[in-house]
Every structure is written in structure tokens, then in C-alpha cells.
Image (cartoon, rainbow, N blue to C red):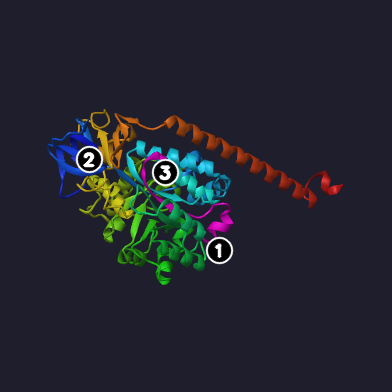
Amino acid sequence: MTTRTLLRNGHVISMDPAVGDLPQGDVLVEDGRIVAVRPEISADAEVLDMTGRIVIPGFVDTHRHTWEAPIRGVAPDATLDDYFVEVLDTFAPLYTPEDVYAANLAGALECLNAGITTLVDWSHINNTPDHPDAAIQGLRESGIRAQYAYGSANTSLADYWFESKIAIPADDVRRIRARHFASDDGLLTMALATRGPGFCVNDVVASEWALARELGIPITVHVAMGRLAGRFGMVKQLHGMGLLGPDTTYVHCCYLSEEEWRMVADSGGTVSVAPQVELQMGHGWPPVMQAIEHGLRPSLSIDVVTTVPGDMFTQIRAAFGAERARVNADCWQANMPVPSTMLTARQMLEIATVNGAHVAGLEDRTGSLTPGKRADIVAIDATALNVAPVHDAAAAVTLCADVSNVDTVLVDGVIHKRDGKLLADTGRALRLVSEARDRLLAAKETKESKESKESKESKGETGETGEKATA
């Protein structure tokens, strides 16, 4: 039986030049697919009244460590160096599959609530074979469109992030590919989240790239972020190993050299920028304009909710403000006018939607309100005090709206948020993620107590402290 939904009388920003913007328009969805976008459509369908709403494609988050939802806000003042110790070396080794499931369920629902309909889940928490199954289950139950990027374990900072000799387990990656992603046409697809040169020895890097290409899945890797990775020249190393290709997304890219930017562009690679994290944690200036200047289509991502908010509105404004601030300061110092190529509010909406779909390898099915694409649609309440009155609809979305204004969310034609209310068992998700938080904090306390006791005993045995040494 055919299912039809008609979004009627909204201000439609399609992000498709062939469709354009419709100040008063309708969007018809049939069996999860957009079939028409026109000023007026008559159809036998369930009608969603979009009067006073701005209708846009869903946001695409191209890089989020969703497993960190239970430890939201634990590292508010962290630098990147701090994060490796405070999160990856402290909490990550303690995660159970149950914690990962709770995190991905709650984290994906957080995305949907904020109008993010597509997520690249950078899942470097596969401490046992049960961990990836749990992560995928959480994503599947949420109903979000997601690319699950299988990453390494995180049981030891020294073992996994300093010239690591431990490769992602190829047999388990193959198992996950066969079990959960036999088809690339589903709501969930697969990628490989690799650590890359500097973090791993070359043999590990080569084996992980080969594994991804054997399985026909894209690759996503952090590069050139701050002092920790900027010095590695990771893209140049990958080029030297003959590994660059159009199947790879480079995350952050804050300290890429001019030569490396050309290598990424020439190889057909894609770029994900996480502006708030990059500014806040010391990765460097978000390189949105640099990517554009090299002919690339940058996307936006959240990265870690341990330190920054989990919504796309924050990322849009961080990128927009940072880039314009950087250019303004340079031009002031040089006593010259600002260039006509300054980022615009409209460009930021493009970057957060259709560019994101491009980077995730899903532009054929999402990212714009184009007939034939899947119906991933968001409606913003433009009658709210912080949005109305609207003069420029794109600017209203990128510079005025926030999560509270996300009124309606559809993924693959399924309504997940309606009249500002998420249609999910949020109570259960909150309970599970809170229980995960409590388990992790208890495990952390137990671990620290044990380490403290062992340290005291060791000092006593070597004569450094106390009566035990002198007895």
C-alpha cells in the first residue's frame, strides 16, 4: 500500500538549483521518496501544515563520536591533548557494549531532535566484538540515516594512539560488513574509521586502507589538527604510500600545508570540519574557506559532546563567525578591504546539508529536496520570537534558529518529530544513558582507587614512604 505525506504551504529552501526556493510551496512524499516540490500540489495524502515553517533538507553531521553521549560535558575546558588523557585514556577503556548501545541510541535521538537526519558515527570504541553490534543496534532503533564508521578499540592510549602496531581487526570488520551491511542501499551504511600515519605504523595504515577497499567501504581519518597531528604531515605520508583516493574523508585539516590541500583536491577526497571543537580545543582555525578555495565542498560535524554542544546550529555559527573574524582581522592588519568571497549565511546552509551528503557519499539520496531523493526533511518554526519576522529564510535558519525551533523531522519519509515533539521513547533513552553514566563513573572511581592503592604499596616496598619500608 502506497503511503503519501504532503508538507503543505511552507517556505521551501530546496538546496537544489533546479527546484529553487519557494516562499510558499508544497513537498509530496510517497513511500519515503520525494516525488514533487511545487508551489501547490493536490494529492490524496496525510497533510502536514507547514504554514509559518521554513522547510529544508535535514542537516548532515559528517563526524561524531556518538559513543561519548553518557560522558557529555566531562571535559568542558579540555585542549586536544587533555582530551586524549581525560576521555580516551580514562573513560574509553571502561565502556561496555551496553554503554555503547545507550550512547548511540540517545545520541542519535539527540541528532533527530536537532534536525540532523544523517550522521557519520565515528565509532572508535570497539573494545570487544560485541561493541560494534551494540553501536549499530542503537543507531538502527533510533531511525536515523547513518554511516557507521568502524574504528579501533580504545583500551590503552599508548597501544592505540602512539605509533600503534595494532590494526583494526579485519575479520571482525568483515563480519560486521556481512551481518549488518550486506547492501549499501539501507538507512544504515558502513565506513572504516582509521587513525592514520603518526598514530599508527605504516604497516597498520596500509592494511587498514586495503581492508576498506577490499570491502568497498569509504574511509574517514583525522588529519592536521593542532600540535598533536599537524606535525605528522599525514596527507603527504598517505600520498607517499599511494593511498590517497576519492573514497577518503579528511576530518579537521586545520594545519594542512598548501601541498597537502592540493593532494586532497587532486585525489577527489572530501573534508569534514568541526568548527566549535577546533576553535575551543586548539586544533586551529576551521578551514572552511581554505577548502572552498581549493575546489572542495566542506561539510560540518559536531565531533565530541564531552566538550561542545551536539547541534548543527552551533557548528554553523562557529564556522561562520570564525572565518569572517579571521579574514576581517587579516584585512584590517593589511589595511585592505575584505574580499567579495567572504562566507555567506546561505553558503553555511549549503555546507550543513547538501555538502554533508556529498561528503558522506549519500548525495544521490539525501541533502536536498530533490524529486527522486529520499525524504529527509526538517521544518523550522519561523513564528517563534527568536526567528520572526523573517526577511531572509536561509539566514533565519543559520543565524537565528536553534534546536527549540525544530518543529518537524522526517527521515526516509518517516515522521520522527512533529509539532516540536520527538516521537520516540525518550524516557527510556535518557534512563539508559544515565545508567551508563553511573556505571562509567563508578568504574572510573574503582580504577583510580585501585591504582592509588597499588602506587602506595609500590612506594612502601621501595623505601620511598612510611613504616613498611623501614620495618
Q: Nearer the viewer, residue 151 or 401?
A: 151
Q: Magenta stretch containing residue 166, yes or no?
A: yes
Q: Which residue is mark 1?
A: 165
Q: CA distance from mark 3 to mark 2?
A: 24 Å
Q: Name the residue type under label 2.
A: Val
Q: Magenta stretch containing residue 291, yes or no?
A: no
Single out the mark in the foreground, 3 or 2.
Answer: 2
Q: In the image, residue 28 lies at what x, y percent?
A: 19, 39
Q: Nearer the viewer, residue 295 or 27?
A: 27
Are the residues flagged by discs 3 and 2 in contact, CB closer than 8 Å? no
Residue 258 sits in quarter: bottom left
Image point 27% across, 36% down: which residue? 400
Q: CA distance from mark 1 to mark 3?
A: 30 Å
Dot 2: what SS? strand
Q: Nearer the viewer, residue 191 or 54?
A: 191
Q: Name the residue type under label 1.
A: Lys
Q: Which mark is residue 139?
A: 3
Is 343 displayed left or right of 108 in the figure?
left
Image point 50% across, 35% down: which residue? 432
Q: Name the residue type under label 3.
A: Leu
Q: CA distance from mark 1 to mark 2?
A: 50 Å
Q: Nearer the viewer, residue 137 or 88?
A: 137
Mark toward the start of the polypeptide (3 vs 2):
2
Residue density around tag 1, few if under 14, some if 14–19, many if 20 or more, within 10 Å:
some
Single out the mark in the foreground, 1 or 3.
Answer: 3
Q: Which residues are magenta?
A: 140-168
Single out the mark in the foreground, 1 or 2.
Answer: 2
Q: Which mark is residue 29?
A: 2
Residue density around tag 2, few if under 14, some if 14–19, many if 20 or more, within 10 Å:
many
